[in-house]
Each structure stands twice: as structure tokens, then as C-alpha cells.
Amino acid sequence: MKKSVASQDQSAAELISSRIAELGDWRGKTLGRMRALIKEADPDVVEEWKWMGTPVWSHSGIICTGESYKTVVKLTFAKGASLKDPAHLFNSSLDGNVRRAIDIHEGEDVDKSDFKALVREAVALNSAGKSKPSKKAKP
């Protein structure tokens, strides 16, 4: 795989689209499909490009990152350990105190409804955290 050339003139959405296109195989298709599901689940999602080339989806905080490796597309939910996962989508990074991830291998599919529910729950958790009163000392 060739190194991607990130231009400061490109938006995060354009950089993510370029990454998906340059992968050119099942990983690009998978990342593109999961990106579309994230946007369906939360039309107000913000796409970001962080850490020298990692797609990030945020809404009142990070929802998840999308990374591609040789044998897996990994979606890491920043607060995954705090999310209910009745469909057991999380299958990676299960020992951590904060994050949880979904590893998708070639030929695997993730249930659309269950995934979108997980994204919506992550958004709700982020939004709830933003609405807490500040812990300022009382006079």
C-alpha cells in the first residue's frame, strides 16, 4: 500500500474518502460501509482526521476511530466499556477499562441495526457527559 499524502487543503471528509479509495480492496469497502452506517445513525456526526492519519467520528466527544490493518478493519469506540452491547459486537480490546473495539475481517459483516444502535448509544453517552454541571467549588 502506498503512503497517503495528506494535504492541509483537504477536509477530514475528503481525507477519509481518499483513504477508503486508496485501500482499494475489501478493507476500503468495509470502512466505507461502516462510515455510511455511522452517518445514518448520527446525521450530525463530525468527521475528523487525527493522529497522522486516523479517521475519527465525533459528536460531543469521540464516538469511534476507524483503522485499517492488513487483516482487519478496526473500529475502536472511545468509551466502549461504558456502552451496553447486547448484540456482542465488541470482539477486541475487551480487557481495557475504557475502550472497546470491533474487528471486522474479510468476508465478515456487522449487523446494521445493532451497529447503528451502538453508535447512537455512544452519542448519547457523550452528550450526557457534556451536560453535567461543572464541579466548581461553592463560595
Image (tube, rainbow, N blue to C red):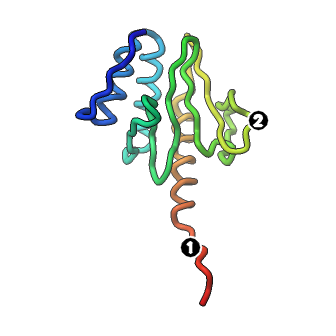
**In the image, what residue type sits under mark 1?**
Pro
- In the rendered image, the vertical position of residue 4 relative to residue 39, given as above or below: above
Residue farthest bottom in this picture: 139
| Disc 1 packing (10 Å; few <14; some 14–19; many ≥20) | few
Q: Residue at x 39, y 15 (%)?
A: 3
Q: Where is residue 62 in the image (x, y as percent from the top left)?
A: 50, 45
Residue at 54 percent across and 17 percent down: it is: 69
* Above or below 129: residue 65: above
Identify which residue is drawn at 33% across, 28% down: 15
Furthest residue toward left: 9
In the rendered image, which quarter contains the N terminus?
top left
Q: Which quarter of the picture shows residue 45?
A: top left
Instruction: Return the disc, 1 or 2, that comes first in the chain's sequence.
Output: 2
Q: Mark 2 points at which residue?
A: 95
Q: In this view, does 132 lie to the left or right of 47?
A: right
Label 2 neighbour load within 10 Å: few <14, some 14-19, many 20+: few
Which numbered disc covers residue 133? 1
Where's the C terminus, which quadrant?
Answer: bottom right
Amino acid type of disc 2?
Asp
From the top left corner, tell me how far across and down residue 46 is, in percent. 38, 44
Position of residue 93 relative to residue 121, above or below, is: above
